Image: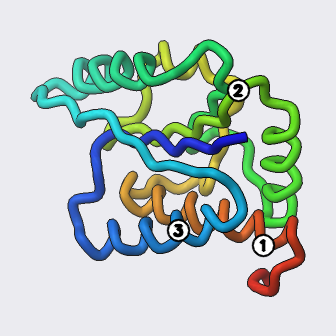
Amino acid sequence: MKIIILSVGKAKDPRVALMADRYLKRLRTFVPATLESVPEAKDPSPSRKVEKEGRGILKAVRERDYLVTLEERGEAFDSPGFSEWISSRIESAPGRVLLVLGGAFGLSEEVRQRSDFALSLSPMTMPHELCLVLLLEQLYRAFTILRGVEYHH
């Protein structure tokens, strides 16, 4: 099973990109994982921007993908609970597990409708670049919990 993290845009801050890359490399010791992106839309209208980005996201989604959208109002877990949840998704998903991070203005309604599960990392709003790092770290932490590797306290 493969995990794909699909993000709108790429990290602009090199320090954030470095942190994301560090956790992605660690995660790959446990599971095949890739980081992909769709271009950030260039439009002055936030609603049109979200719609354009949504079309880009949906083009990257395959029929058999288990699509997880990251949303403020999604379901939240503690780290052990998240590790159990991601393990069950990987075992039961018919295709890839695709985790989607929207752009600065969020996700389109079409992407939300296609979503199989809405996940929240926090009820607070955060920059999507930091959300990427937090997601990768929590995925890495989840697999260390599952494999009994000393990391999670």
Q: Nearer the viewer, mark 1 or mark 2?
A: 2
Mark 1 belongs to which amino acid?
Thr
Position of residue 83 measured from the top left corner of the image (x, y, whole percent):
82, 58
Look at the image and tell me whether residue 93 can be seen: yes
| Residue placed most toward the observer, 142 or 95 | 95
Task: Tell me the tag on residue 144.
Answer: 1
Q: Is residue 49 left or right of residue 51?
A: left
Query: What percent of the width, then of the height, locates residue 152?
Result: 78, 81
Q: Is residue 137 left or right of residue 15?
A: right
Mark 3–mark 1 distance (CA, rounded to whole Å): 13 Å
Q: Which residue corresponds to the image point at 86% horizontal and 32% vertical from the top-left?
A: 92
Q: Residue 58 placed where, x, y %? A: 45, 18
Q: Is residue 112 above or below residue 150?
A: above
Kindly identify the residue that appears in the image at 88 percent across and 54 percent down: 84
- Residue tagged 2: 95
* For residue 18, above or below residue 92: below
Question: In which quadrant will I find the N terminus?
Answer: top right
Q: Work out whether residue 44 or residue 60 is closer to the camera in this orientation and state it.
A: 60
Element class at badge 2: loop
Secondary structure beneath disc 1?
helix
Report the number of discs. 3
| 3D distance between C-alphas at marks 1 and 2 | 23 Å
> Callout 1: few (<14), some (14-19), or many (20+) C-alpha neighbours within 10 Å?
some
Residue 82's spot in the image, x, y percent?
A: 79, 56
Q: Which image quarter is the C terminus in?
A: bottom right
